[in-house]
Image (cartoon, grey):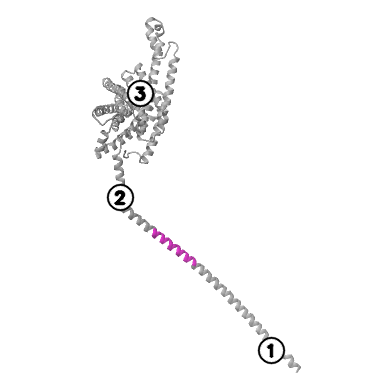
């Protein structure tokens, strides 16, 4: 029995070991299954991430295709709208250009007067003051640009004459605008002066055409002044000097080309009419209503007749500056100062194309001053030549008293003391520099103002 009792636990231990082995095996299988499950979950997550990325890419691709489709549709819509509206817009642009051409004023040639006057002033400064340096050829460049501008304005107005002849006739019959037609012939005369040294044949051709055309304008305009009953004192303004200035301007190049009698003819016409019109103008300014704001800048034209007259008279007088020439110069200088001191009146004005009336008179005053400097220099050189010769002994004789008076009164030279003439020369040289700077600033300002006005479409519009 004891042996039996000893042998009984063995099966239980075997059974326990078997159970433990099965449990371990089950645990391992469970662990493997869990690992497999986790691997499957990770694989599924990776696949899901890939699918999500693919869906995102597909969505982006669809969005890009949709955006491209919308842009293409928008472009097509705009193209159709432009195709539908194009003819209308083109018609509107064409109509706008036609309207601006219709209202293109003959007074636009005043721009050429200012630019050619500035060109001549720079030319004379290069020769007389050596400033700006002649080697830079600044005056030649300005002359080329001015000539191109003249051709452009002339072409535009010729087109207006062809397409809108009735509007050109209306300007010819207008009591104020009529006076601006001679700006065409004056432009030719000024270009003749500007090209005198560069090309004498071209200068002569321009002078002949300009002189003939200006004679026609003068006869027509003066006839209208006499016969037209619609012209009243309120129509009178300084622009009426424009035909007069043209007549006085003809001798400037005419004398250099040798046409002295023709030059005297036109100088006489211009000078006498200048005195008459100057009287009427001051009557208008003092005893009648003020000038319209648009025409106030034309008051500067008063400077031009005596300033140009000084140059023209000295030219036909074989470049001899006598007392009459001096009277013309100093009267022009007085008018210039008279207008400059009224700066406040001019500065309050809104920009009009008539602002170009400032330019040519100031240029003419500058050229006259430079011309006077040249004449004084030549007289001093001539006097020095005489002083170095037998003249001092002659001046001490009774016969030389008249010549001594000439030296003192005309040249400002007391024999043996030439500092008076030198002071006079230096004064006019300084004045010439000041005027040259003034006309340069005025031209730059006017070009800038005109460009802004053209851009803003404030020029070439119908006026009330």
Residue extending furthest toward the right: 2
Along the polypeptide, which appears first: circle 3 or circle 1? 1
Q: Secondary structure at mark 1?
A: helix
- Quadrant placement of the C terminus: top left
Please give the residue where the numbered disc 3 appears in the rendered image. Answer: 307
Residue extending furthest toward the top: 398
Residue at 41 percent of width and 6 percent of height: 396
Q: Is residue 38 left or right of residue 296?
A: right
Q: Residue 50, image x and y in percent? A: 50, 67
Give the Cα distance between marks 3 and 1: 149 Å
Q: Residue 39, image x and y in percent? A: 56, 72
Q: Secondary structure at mark 2?
A: helix
Q: Residue 228, image x and y in percent? A: 24, 30
Q: In terms of depth relative to the viewer, which is nearer, 307 or 282?
A: 282
Q: In terms of depth relative to the viewer, which is nearer, 230 or 296?
A: 230
Q: Residues within 10 Å of mark 3 (few under 14, many from 20)?
A: many
Please give the residue where the numbered disc 2 appears in the rendered image. Answer: 88
Q: Main secondary structure of the magenta part?
A: helix
Res. 322 in view = no
**In terms of image quadrants, where is residue 258?**
top left
Work out whether 322 lies above or below 20: above
Along the polypeptide, which appears first: circle 3 or circle 2? 2
Please give the residue where the numbered disc 1 appears in the rendered image. Answer: 11
Along the polypeptide, which appears first: circle 1 or circle 2? 1
Give the Cα distance between marks 1 and 2: 113 Å
Q: In terms of depth relative to the viewer, which is nearer, 55 or 410?
A: 410
Magenta-drawn segment: 52-70
Q: Residue 374, image x and y in percent? A: 38, 20
Res. 3 in view = yes
Q: Is residue 47 left or right of residue 115?
A: right
Q: Secondary structure at mark 3?
A: helix
* Label 1 with label 2: CB-CB less than 8 Å: no
């Amino acid at each position: 029995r004891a042996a039996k009792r000893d042998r009984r636990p063995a099966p239980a231990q075997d059974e326990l070991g078997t159970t433990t082995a099965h449990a371990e095996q089950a645990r391992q299988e469970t662990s493997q299954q869990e690992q497999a499950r986790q691997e499957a979950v990770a694989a599924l997550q990776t696949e899901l991430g890939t699918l999500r990325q693919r869906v995102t890419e597909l969505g982006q691709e669809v969005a890009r295709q949709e955006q491209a489709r919308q842009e293409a549709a928008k472009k097509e819509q705009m193209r159709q709208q432009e195709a539908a509206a194009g003819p209308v817009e083109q018609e509107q642009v064409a109509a706008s250009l036609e309207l601006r051409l219709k209202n293109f004023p003959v007074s636009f040639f005043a721009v050429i007067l200012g630019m050619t006057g500035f060109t001549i002033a720079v030319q004379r400064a290069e020769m007389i003051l050596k400033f700006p340096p002649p080697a830079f050829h600044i005056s030649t460049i300005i002359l080329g640009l001015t000539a191109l501008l003249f051709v452009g304005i002339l072409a535009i107005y010729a087109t207006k004459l062809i397409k809108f002849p009735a509007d050109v006739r209306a300007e010819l019959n207008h009591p104020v605008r009529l006076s601006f037609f001679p700006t065409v012939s004056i432009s030719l005369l000024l270009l003749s002066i500007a090209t005198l040294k560069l090309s004498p044949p071209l200068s002569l051709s321009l002078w002949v055409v300009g002189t003939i055309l200006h004679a026609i304008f003068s006869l027509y305009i003066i006839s209208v002044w006499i016969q037209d009953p619609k012209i009243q004192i309120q129509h009178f303004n300084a622009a009426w000097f424009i035909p007069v200035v043209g007549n006085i301007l003809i001798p400037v190049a005419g004398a250099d080309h040798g046409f002295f009698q023709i030059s005297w003819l036109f100088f006489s016409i211009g000078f006498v009419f200048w005195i008459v019109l100057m009287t009427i103008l001051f009557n208008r300014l003092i005893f009648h209503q003020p000038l319209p704001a648009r025409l106030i800048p034309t008051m500067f034209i008063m400077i031009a007749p005596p300033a140009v007259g000084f140059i023209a008279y000295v030219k036909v007088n074989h470049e001899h500056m006598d007392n009459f020439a001096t009277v013309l110069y100093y009267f022009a200088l007085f008018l210039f100062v008279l207008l400059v001191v009224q700066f406040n009146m001019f500065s309050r004005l809104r920009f009009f194309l008539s602002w170009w009336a400032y330019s040519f008179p100031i240029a003419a005053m500058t050229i006259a001053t430079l011309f006077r400097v040249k004449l004084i220099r030549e007289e001093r050189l001539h006097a020095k030549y005489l002083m170095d010769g037998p003249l001092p002994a002659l001046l001490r004789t009774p016969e030389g008293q008249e010549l001594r008076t000439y030296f003192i009164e005309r040249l400002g030279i007391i024999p043996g003391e030439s500092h008076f003439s030198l002071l006079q020369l230096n004064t006019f040289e300084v004045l010439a520099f000041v005027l040259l700077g003034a006309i340069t600033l005025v031209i730059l300002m006017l070009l800038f103002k005109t460009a802004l006005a053209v851009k803003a479409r404030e020029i070439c519009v119908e006026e009330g």
